[in-house]
Image (tube, grey):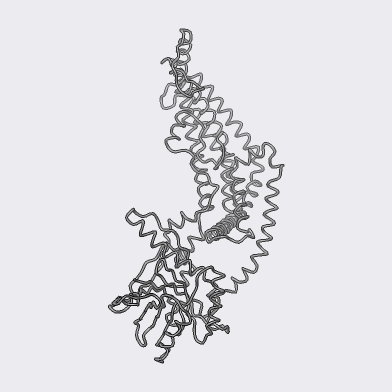
Amino acid sequence: MVLKAFFPTCCASADSGLLVGRWVPEQSSAIVLAVVHFPFIPIQVKELLAQVQQASQVGVAVLGTWCHRQQEPEESLGHFLEGLGTIFSHEPWLQLCRERGSKSWSCKAIRQQVPVAPGVPSEDQVMLIFYDQRKVLLSQLHPPTVLPDHQAGDAVASSGSLAVVFDTVARSELLFHGDQYDEGPVRLSHWQSEGVEASVLGELAKRASGPVCLLLACLLSLVSAVSACWLWKLWPLPFIRSKLSTCEQLRHRLEHLTLVFSTQRAQSPTQLMRKANMLVSVLLDVALGLMLLSWLHSSNRIGQLADALVPVADRVAEELQHLLQWLMGAPAGLKMNRALDQVLGRFFLYHIHLWISYIHLMSPFIERILWHVGLSACLGLTVALSILSDIIALLTFHIYCFYVYGARLYCLKIYGLSSLWRLFRGKKWNVLRQRVDSCSYNLDQLFIGTLLFTILVFLLPTTALYYLVFTLLRLLVVTVQGLIHLLVDLINSLPLYSLGLRLCRPYRLAAGVKFRVLEHEAGRPLRLLMQINPLPYSHVVHTYRLPSCGCHPKHSWGSLCRKLFFGELIYPWRQRGDRQD
C-alpha cells in the first residue's frame, strides 16, 4: 500500500525529534505539522497534544520520528529514535531521515501490530510530499470548477484529500503559537519557529478596532433609527425616495457600513472576505469622492459649471423647438395629418416654453445647489454620481413627459386598431378567460368599427412619427443614466480587496494544487513538491462579487422591442424590487 506523507518544507533543516501531525486513515495520509525537539518529557508532549486536540477538534498525535543526521552525527541516535515507538504507539510508525552530507531522503512506514503473511514486506511504500506550511495555513481552498464527466470523479476525490490537508493546518493554529526559543517544556519546529510573525501597527489596529467599531455601530444605529422614523413614511416621501437614485445609494451604503462595523465576529472566511471587500469599496469610494470634491472646489469650477448650465439648457430647448417645427411641416417629405400635427406640435411647444421659464426661475439658485451637490461628494463618488443621475432626470423631465404623451397616444391607437381588426374577423377578446373567442356583430357595429378603423389608420403615421422621435430622445437620456448606474454598480460590487489579494498574494486564494517531482529514483521514496494554484481573476470576481443596488436591464432585447412597438412604457434601468407603474 502506498502511504502519502505531507511534510512541511520549514522542518527540512530542523533538529532530530518527533513528528507531530494527523493521520487520515481513509486516504492513507499522514499530515506532519511540527517536529518536537530534544530534550522533552513524554507526558508533557502528550499533554500539549491533548490541549491542541481539545481546542482544534483535530486528532493530533505523534506519527513517528525525524532524524537529521547532518546535525546529529551520532550513530546511536537512530536506535534511540526507533525505541520511541514503544512510548508513542501509532500505526503506522513513520521514520523519516535526511542523509548526512547529501540531499537524499529515506522514509519508512512500519506496522508492528498487524500480522504479516510470509513473503509480504511489513513496510508500506511512502510518497513524500513537501508543502509550504505558511501558505497552506493562510490560503483558502475553493471548490473546483465544473469539469467534464470523465474527470468529475477524479476532481472530487482530489479536492477532498486536499481539503483535509488545508483544513488540518488551518485548525491546528494553536500548535504554531510557540517557537523553538520558548522556555516551555516542549520546543517545536514549524513555520513560525524563528519567531511569531507580528506587526506593531497590526496589533495597535486590533486593539483600537473594538472601541472604534462600537462607536461607529452606535452612530449607524442612530442614523438607521432616524431614517426609519414614521415622518419619512408620509406621502409623498416614500414615492420620491423610490424614484431617486441618491436615496437608494445612501440606503445601500448604510447597510454596508452597518455590516462592516458590526461588533459581531465573522463566522467564516467567506464572511470575513465580504467584510473586507465592503470596507475597501467604501474607502475607495470616499477617496474618489474627496478627489472629486477637491477638483470641484479648485479654480471656481462650480461657478463655471453653474454659468454653463443655463445656456446648455436653453440650447437644448431651442433644438427641441426646431425639431418640433420640423415635425409640424413635412418631415422627410412625409404627408402628415395637418390638424393633428398642429395640435401635437403646439402642445409640445407650450411644454418647452414652461420648461424654459422654470430653468430661468431656478438660475439664481443653481450655483448654490451645485455647491451642496459637490459637498455631498465627501460621502463617496457613488453618491455624487447618483445625484448627477437624478439631476439629469430632472433636467430632462420635459423629454420624459413628451415620451409618455406620445407613447400613451400611440399605444391607444395600436390597441384600438388591434381590437377593430378582430371585429372584422368576427372575433373578440374574452377578458375572463384571457383568450380570443368568436363573436357575431350586427351591421351597425361593423359600420362604426370600419369608420373608427379608417380614422385610426390615417392618424397613425402622424402619431407614430412623434412617438418615434421622442422615444429616441428618451432612450438617449436613459442610456446616459444607465452608464452612470453601471459605474456606480461597478464601484459597489467589485471585490477590490480580493482582487488585490489575488494580485499581491495569489496563494491566499487557492483553486487547487500542482505537484512537481523532486526525486524519483529506484529504492528511494518518491518526493514531490506541492504548489498552490491561484484562483483565476474571473472566478475571484464571480465568487466574491458584492450585492449591489445598481440598476440592470429589466427586459430582454425581444421584450424591449415588443414594448417599443406596442407603445408600452419602458424603464430599462429601474431599481431592483420596484414595481413598474
The foreground one among 323 and 280 is 280
Residue 567 x %, y %: 48, 29
Which quarter of the rendering shows the C terminus? top right
Residue at (56, 25) in percent of width and height: 347
Determine which quarter of the picture holds residue 209. bottom right
Which quarter of the rendering shows the N terminus? bottom left
Q: Is residue 437 above or below residue 7?
A: above
In the rendered view, does 321 fall on the left or right side of 332? right
Q: Residue furthest top?
A: 443
The foreground one among 58 and 434 is 58
Q: Is residue 248 above or below residue 448?
A: below
Q: Is residue 339 above or below residue 288?
A: above
In the rendered view, does 570 fall on the left or right side of 221? left
Residue 36 x %, y %: 49, 81
The foreground one among 80 and 523 is 80
Q: In this view, does 399 lie above or below 205?
A: above
Residue 359 x %, y %: 62, 37
Residue at (34, 82) in percent of width and height: 104
Residue 444 x %, y %: 48, 8
Determine which quarter of the picture holds residue 283. bottom right
